[in-house]
């Protein structure tokens, strides 16, 4: 399996592959790989000749230094896991911070037409500038035909689509269904940090979203939101940060239901010190 740490080396390999008309998929990750990541990679392998998996904990998308320091870094384990899928069709790009940012670790500033100010943007200042910075950098280095992102981070997915549209990038962005644990909890590298008591309680998040979907056809968004807030007020272990029903295109909170629009429910919850997000399509 090829593992590259420098832009120069991987760009050289990508150029050779493209000269042979080999299609390239990209799955950007921050490592600590799990079955959710593997589902993206497997789809990429089905739709491309080669898949580049980037493993890079991006400092500019963390607004909490402690969260950055605690983020799991498991490169050796990740490489072994990827070898169980394919030894010859996966290319790993695991650069240093200096390789990506040079001497100054700063993010660029982006305009995502307001998508960046909703939900996560209200609670994680500068987060999406960091996301945009690393994603556009990876697109420049890898030059993939297709790039794969999970719908668990649906707001991020929409922002990356906007990034591609506004910068006229030649890459096809593909959203992939949320991969869940058997109990319904959305797969996340952060799940590794959950203490057992919170791990057993966390499926309550998805159960609440499922009921939200059932209620959506008959009850107003405001009534549903009130119900969700009450449910979490009664839960001693999980702390609700936000719950929003939003238009999937603008990500703005619903004002009045329209049959012509698609909606999703978005939620962020603290399970102890670990912040979990999830969402569900409502119509």
Image (cartoon, helix red, strand yellow):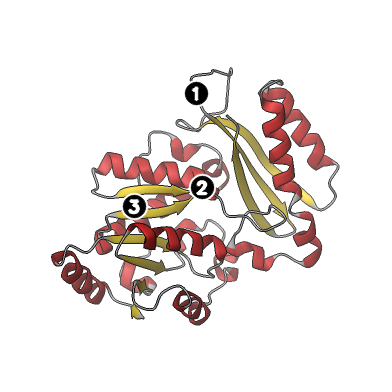
Distance from disc 1 to disc 3, alpha carbons, whole Å, reads 32 Å
Q: Nearer the viewer, residue 201 or 1?
A: 1
Which percent across, then down, holds residue 166? 28, 39
Mark 2 or mark 1: name the one nearer the start of the chain: 2
Residue 224's quadrant in the figure?
A: top right
Q: Nearer the viewer, residue 75 or 95?
A: 75
Residue 106 seen anywhere in this rendered image of the structure: no
Between label 3 and label 2, give the one nearer the viewer: 2
Q: How many marks?
A: 3
Residue 270 seen anywhere in this rendered image of the structure: yes
Mark 3 or mark 2: name the one nearer the start of the chain: 3
Q: Which mark is residue 49?
A: none
Q: Is residue 276 above or below residue 75?
A: above
Per the image, the residue denoted by label 1 is 261
Q: Which mark is residue 151?
A: 2
Distance from disc 3 to disc 2, alpha carbons, whole Å, reads 24 Å
Which percent across, then down, holds residue 276? 64, 53
Q: Nearer the viewer, residue 145 or 101?
A: 145
| Cβ–Cβ under 8 Å for marks 2 and 1 | no
Per the image, the residue denoted by label 3 is 108
Residue 282's quadrant in the figure?
A: top right
Q: Which residue shows up at 38% across the image and 60% down it?
A: 46
Please tell me whether mark 2 sits on a helix, a strand or a loop: helix
């Amino acid at each position: 399996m090829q593992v590259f740490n420098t832009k120069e080396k991987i760009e050289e390999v990508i150029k050779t592959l493209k000269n042979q008309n080999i299609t390239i998929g990209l799955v950007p990750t921050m490592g600590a790989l799990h079955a959710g990541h593997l589902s993206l990679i497997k789809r990429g392998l089905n739709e491309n000749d080669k898949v580049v998996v980037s493993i890079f904990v991006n400092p500019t998308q963390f607004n909490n230094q402690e969260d950055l320091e605690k983020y799991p870094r498991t490169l050796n384990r990740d490489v072994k896991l990827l070898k169980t899928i394919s030894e010859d069709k996966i290319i790993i790009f695991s650069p240093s911070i200096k390789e990506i940012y040079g001497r100054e670790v700063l993010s660029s500033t982006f305009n995502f037409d307001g998508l960046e100010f909703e939900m996560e943007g209200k609670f994680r200042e500068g987060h999406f500038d960091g996301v945009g910075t690393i994603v556009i950098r990876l697109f420049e280095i890898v030059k993939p035909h297709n790039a794969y992102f999970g719908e668990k981070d649906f707001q991020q997915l929409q922002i990356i689509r906007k990034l591609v549209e506004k910068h006229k990038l030649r890459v096809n962005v593909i959203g992939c269904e949320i991969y869940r644990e058997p109990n319904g909890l959305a797969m996340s590298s952060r799940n590794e940090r959950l203490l057992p008591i919170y791990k057993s309680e966390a499926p309550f998040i998805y159960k609440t979203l499922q009921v939200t979907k059932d209620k959506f056809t008959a009850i107003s968004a405001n009534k549903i939101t009130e119900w969700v807030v009450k449910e979490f007020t009664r839960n001693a272990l999980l702390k609700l940060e936000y719950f929003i029903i939003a238009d999937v295109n603008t990500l703005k909170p619903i004002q009045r239901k329209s049959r012509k629009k698609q909606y999703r429910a978005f939620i962020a919850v603290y399970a102890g010190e670990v912040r979990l997000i999830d969402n569900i399509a409502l119509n």
